[in-house]
Amino acid sequence: MYLRQIQVEFNHCDPAGIVFYPRYFEMTNSVMENFFREVAGQSYAAMMQVREGVPTARLEAEFHAPSRLGEVLEWRLVVTRLGGASIAATLTAWCGDSHRVTAKMVLVRVGGDGRPMPWEDAMRAKITTFMEQGMEAGDA
């Protein structure tokens, strides 16, 4: 499991002082971006320099409880599937023992032509270490 903490800032909140729901999507993107840099060994900046990327193909969320200004959310990322050019992950945000949000994402590795491209062996091996137990890397 990959962990990342994000403190809820003023810019994340609506006038009531709770996280405005689209800001959670910015946070999930931040978690994924840092996962690729710290775990997979490929920063988004490095990928963009060679006209590659991992755009989000699917994103769904379930909101369990509000998050408030000043709280620190612990984001937990588990890879649930690793395909030939895609990655599926579940991200959950917690504040203490309070579950705040669950997001399920699918990203696809693409080349400069916008078409899916397979994972490099080294990147695949690094990502696989964060797969949920019982899940396996597939060919799709």
Image: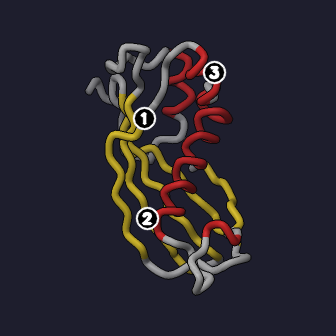
Q: SS for tag 1? A: loop
- Residue to which mark 2 is pinned: 102
Q: Earlier in the sequence, mark 1 or mark 3?
A: 3
- Residue to which mark 3 is pinned: 46
Q: Is 108 situated left or right of 30 in this image? A: left
Tell me which residue sits at (48%, 81%) in the image.
65
Amino acid type, residue under disc 2 in the picture: Thr
List the single residue furthest toward the left.
Answer: 140
Q: Earlier in the sequence, mark 2 or mark 3?
A: 3
Measured as percent of width and height from the top left, residue 129 is found at: 54, 35
Amino acid type, residue under disc 3 in the picture: Ala
Is 109 above or below relative to 49?
A: below
Q: SS for tag 2? A: strand
The answer to whether the residue labelled 2 contacts the one labelled 1, judged by CB atoms less than 8 Å apart, is: no
How far is the residue under mark 2 from the one under mark 3? 28 Å
List the single residue furthest toward the bottom.
Answer: 16
Tell me which residue sits at (51%, 72%) in the image.
20
Measured as percent of width and height from the top left, residue 30 is found at: 60, 48
Amino acid type, residue under disc 1 in the picture: Pro
Q: Is 7 situated left or right of 83 in this image? A: right
Q: Is 110 situated left or right of 51 in this image? A: left
Q: Which mark is residue 55?
A: 1
How far is the residue under mark 2 from the one under mark 1? 19 Å
Tell me which residue sits at (42%, 16%) in the image.
111
Measured as percent of width and height from the top left, residue 22 is found at: 47, 63
Tell me which residue sits at (40%, 22%) in the image.
110
Is residue 127 or residue 13 the one in the foreground?
A: 13
Q: Quadrant of residue 140?
A: top left
Q: Which mark is residue 6?
A: none
Q: SS for tag 3? A: helix
Q: Quadrant of residue 109?
A: top left
